[in-house]
């Protein structure tokens, strides 16, 4: 029996030392008998300074606490938010719990638990110079010395530490090495959804199988505690009463028996579900923001509609956690066809062609209306669907179809889908216009090529006709005139001069015809090719 009491005393004493709340033992006349490290930190004083000091001075800014300290028998147990003073005189707001207990000498006393909430905006007037430190207890010298001697001794009564344990704001527990809870406080019971600590202990026979959501987390916890002896800030998901899941931060240390063997574990549990939800929301918002920025850069950097579509649906699936994402457009015949998609294989057959999906898609295309709908598969699976019109320059250029789990949050998903759909609609319209412009440019280039070919062919034909017609006739005329002059001598000098002028004109006609032929179609181009023709042309110009 004595060994069990010793272990109980050591456990409560350990909680008294490691608790983050401030814990004070105060005599019935308001003298501090003991203080834990949390109280020293919150009140800004050393333990030796707090012991034997008048606690009324710390509470002088709030008369309710003075009443609780002085008339505890009439007031009973006290819980509430109060303004306290630090050792330096600065005020702060705290949750305060006060309960009666017995001192070592079986005298009435008070167990005070302080949980700091925040700073006060302005110090409240208490009639004391704020630059002065609080005065210590001003009783008779022999009484002060007596209280100091009593307070200097650690309290050996189990009742003293049990009061702190049961009234602590932090969830505290003690368990056996095999995971059976042996002692928990009210805060621990509230964290896991139980009315009383006794109900929690009776309901949970095995922590590993009943409280841990992921068994591997318990194995990791066991490995760390065996390796280091203590664990601080171990985060894991745990089950509450009724099956709901919370995130918890666990601080644990190992208990040893008189032989040095592991006797169990004790520590604290903090519900950090809200913090985790906040972190998840922040991460999601960052992912969404990065996705929007990435999509904007993509849409501004390319006019390839196929690349725009494939990257867009991939980004949507990743950011929104979608099962599948599809962009559908109308073809030239007015029928809706898939333009690009991601994750279609994850949908059951003909899921997109259910009446609800068909109606939502049609309304998005024709009426520019956003629709959400529910789908139920042949094997009982459920999906949530969204259809959003893609608008470009006031025209519907397509429809975005998104399919995700039934638990998909509609408000946040629709916000992301709307943002990306607006960018996608403009990008698709720009890409479509660019493709049309590219097609027109290609057709124009083709027509210009045909025109140049026709022009070149015409030049070649004219050159050959001039060469075979006019030039040949001029050459023949020149030769006949020369033959005529040789056979029929002229009777006068003037006639000879006239004939010479005629021969000169005919010769000039021949040369002009050859020049025209060369400009229209250089003979070297047909005879020797482009390179030689260009070389000869350069030489002639030189």
Image (spheres, grey):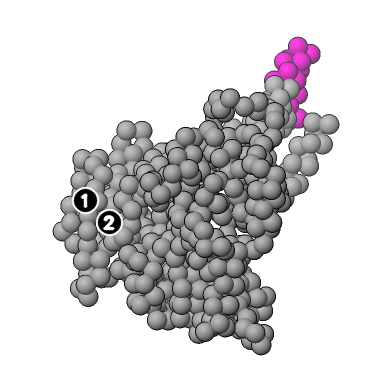
- Secondary element type, mark 1: helix
* Residue 388 appears in view: yes
| Residue 300 point in image, percent of width and height | 52, 40
| Residue 225 point in image, percent of width and height | 61, 76
Question: Looking at the image, which is closer to me, 210 or 526?
Answer: 210
Q: Main secondary structure of the magenta part?
A: helix
Label 1 Cα neighbours within 10 Å, binned few <14 / some 14-19 / many ≥20? many
Identify the residue position indicated by label 2 in the image: 385
Could you give the CA–CA distance between mark 2 and mark 1, rounded to whole angstroms? 9 Å
Which residue is rendered at x = 65% and y = 39% of the image? 138
Quadrant of residue 476 in the image? top right
Horizontally, is 442 left or right of 146 in the view? Answer: left
Horizontally, is 234 left or right of 486 in the view? Answer: left
- Secondary element type, mark 2: strand
Quadrant of residue 15 in the image? bottom right
Horizontally, is 166 left or right of 51 in the view? Answer: left
Identify the residue position indicated by label 1 in the image: 360
* Residue 218 appears in view: no
Select label 2 or label 1 by which is in front.
Answer: 2
Magenta residues span 485-502
Which residue is rendered at x = 51% and y = 37% of the image? 83
Which residue is rendered at x = 59% and y = 68% of the image? 156
| Residue 116 point in image, percent of width and height | 54, 45
Question: Looking at the image, which is closer to me, 9 or 516?
Answer: 9
First along the sequence among labels 2 and 1 = 1
Q: Which mark is residue 349?
A: none
* Quadrant placement of the C terminus: top right
Q: Is residue 488 above or below residue 415?
A: above
Say if mark 2 contacts mark 1, CB within 8 Å.
yes
């Amino acid at each position: 029996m004595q060994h069990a009491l010793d272990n109980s005393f050591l456990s409560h004493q350990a909680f008294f030392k490691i608790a983050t709340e401030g814990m004070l033992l105060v005599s019935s006349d308001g003298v501090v008998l003991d203080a834990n490290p949390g109280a020293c930190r919150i009140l800004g004083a050393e333990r030796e300074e707090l012991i034997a000091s008048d606690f009324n001075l710390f509470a002088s800014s709030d008369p309710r606490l003075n009443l609780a300290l002085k008339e505890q028998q009439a007031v009973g147990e006290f819980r509430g938010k109060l303004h306290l003073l630090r050792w330096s005189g600065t005020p702060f707001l705290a949750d305060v719990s006060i309960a009666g207990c017995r001192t070592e000498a079986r005298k009435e006393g008070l167990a005070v638990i302080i949980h700091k909430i925040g700073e006060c905006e302005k110090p409240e007037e208490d009639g004391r110079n704020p630059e002065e430190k609080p005065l210590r207890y001003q009783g008779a010298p022999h009484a002060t010395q007596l209280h100091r001697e009593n307070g200097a001794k650690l309290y050996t009564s189990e009742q003293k530490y049990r009061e702190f344990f049961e009234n602590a704001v932090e969830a505290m527990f003690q368990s056996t090495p095999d995971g059976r809870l042996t002692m928990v406080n009210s805060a621990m019971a509230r964290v896991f959804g139980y009315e009383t600590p006794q109900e929690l202990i009776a309901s949970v026979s095995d922590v590993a199988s009943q409280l841990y959501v992921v068994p591997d987390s318990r194995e990791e916890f066991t490995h760390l505690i065996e390796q280091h002896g203590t664990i601080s800030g171990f985060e894991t998901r745990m089950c509450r009463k009724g099956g709901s899941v919370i995130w918890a931060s666990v601080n644990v240390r190992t208990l040893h028996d008189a032989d040095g063997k592991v006797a169990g574990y004790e520590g604290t549990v903090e519900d950090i579900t809200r913090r985790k939800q906040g972190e998840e929301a922040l991460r999601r918002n960052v992912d969404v923001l990065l996705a929007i920025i990435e999509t904007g850069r993509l849409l501004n950097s390319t006019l390839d509609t196929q690349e725009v579509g494939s990257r867009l649906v991939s980004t949507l699936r990743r950011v929104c956690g979608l099962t599948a994402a599809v962009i559908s457009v109308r073809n030239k015949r007015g029928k809706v066809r898939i333009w690009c998609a991601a994750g279609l294989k994850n949908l059951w057959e003909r899921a997109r062609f259910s009446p609800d999906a068909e109606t939502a898609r049609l309304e998005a295309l024709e009426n520019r209306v956003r629709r959400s709908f529910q789908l139920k598969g042949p094997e009982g699976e459920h999906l949530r669907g969204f259809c959003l019109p893609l608008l470009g320059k006031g025209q519907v250029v397509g429809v975005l179809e998104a399919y995700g789990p039934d638990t998909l949050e509609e408000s946040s998903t629709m916000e992301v889908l709307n943002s990306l759909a607006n960018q996608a609609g403009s990008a698709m319209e720009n890409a479509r216009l660019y493709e049309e412009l590219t097609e027109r440019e290609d057709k124009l280039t083709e027509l210009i090529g045909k025109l140049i070919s026709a022009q070149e062919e015409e030049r070649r034909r004219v050159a050959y006709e001039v060469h075979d017609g006019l030039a040949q006739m001029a050459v023949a005329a020149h030769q006949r005139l020369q033959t005529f002059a040789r056979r029929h001598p002229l009777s006068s000098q003037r006639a000879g001069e006239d004939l010479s002028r005629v021969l000169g004109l005919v010769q000039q006609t021949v040369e002009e015809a050859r020049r025209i032929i060369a400009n229209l179609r250089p003979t070297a181009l047909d005879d020797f090719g482009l390179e030689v023709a260009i070389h000869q042309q350069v030489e002639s110009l030189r």
